[in-house]
């Protein structure tokens, strides 16, 4: 388990406490017999951990950032399943010298300056509509196991009681994003 985590984090320094919390979340995410609320919380904890680490495996065009000091922004679009979990996961985190920031929006639109967008969907905007609004922009879109036509570049899926992810490499290229081969190798499936 620890080798898998070390591979995923690419040797990046994790505090011992953060590493243990993440390891526990990954281990217990699929424990049968837990109450449904506990599974949901653990599943979202694992997804929040993934979201906080994805940026280290993506290269954005330089124009994606206003300046070298501009934070890397993870945007939650629609209903937020993570609440404070994601904020805690990114506390003190930097990627390529940029601080990581979490921002929440009710709907996707132009000029949001997001590098990663988790599209939860809401009554105000479906995931499909949010994907259309961000299409062609250098934004790493992330969705949950969706219906056809609602897959982001990264799609979280639950397989064998574990949170995994699939990647749409073609969409990443169309959106001018370069994904690390390490990230691609960890995906359950890569659509090319």
Image (spheres, grey):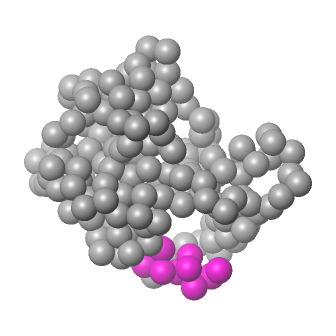
Q: Residue at x 80, y 40 (%)?
A: 37
Q: Main secondary structure of the magenta part?
A: helix
Check if residue 2 falls in the magenta segment: yes
Residue 139 sits above or below residue 180 on the image: above
Check if residue 183 falls in the magenta segment: no
Q: Residue furthest bottom?
A: 3
Q: Which residues are magenta?
A: 1-10
The answer to whether residue 55 is visible is no
Q: Residue at x 60, y 40 (%)?
A: 82
Q: Residue furthest front?
A: 148
Q: Quadrant of the C terminus?
A: bottom left
Q: Position of residue 152 (x, y in %)?
A: 36, 44
Q: Position of residue 190 (x, y in %)?
A: 35, 63
Image position of 8 (left or right of 47): left
Q: Residue at x 65, y 75 (%)?
A: 16
Q: Position of residue 64 (x, y in %)?
A: 17, 46
Q: Residue at x 21, y 26 (%)?
A: 110
Judge by depth and name the residue closer to the eye, 60 or 187. 187
């Amino acid at each position: 388990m620890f080798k898998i985590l070390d591979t995923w984090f690419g040797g990046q320094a994790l505090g011992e406490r953060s590493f243990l919390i993440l390891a526990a979340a990954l281990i217990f995410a699929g424990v049968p017999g837990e109450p449904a609320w506990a599974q949901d919380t653990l599943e979202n904890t694992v997804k929040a951990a993934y979201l906080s680490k994805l940026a280290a495996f993506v290269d954005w065009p330089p124009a994606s950032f206003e300046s070298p000091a501009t934070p890397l922004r993870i945007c939650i679009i629609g209903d937020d399943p993570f609440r404070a979990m994601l904020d805690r996961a990114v506390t003190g985190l930097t990627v390529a010298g940029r601080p990581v920031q979490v921002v929440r929006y009710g709907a996707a639109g132009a000029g949001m300056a997001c590098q990663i967008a988790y599209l939860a969907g809401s009554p105000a905007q479906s995931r499909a509509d949010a994907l259309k609004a961000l299409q062609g922009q250098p934004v790493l879109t992330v969705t949950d196991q969706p219906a056809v036509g609602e897959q982001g570049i990264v799609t979280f899926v639950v397989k064998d009681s574990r949170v995994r992810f699939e990647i749409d490499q073609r969409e990443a290229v169309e959106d001018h994003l370069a994904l690390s081969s390490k990230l691609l190798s960890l995906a359950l499936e890569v659509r090319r």
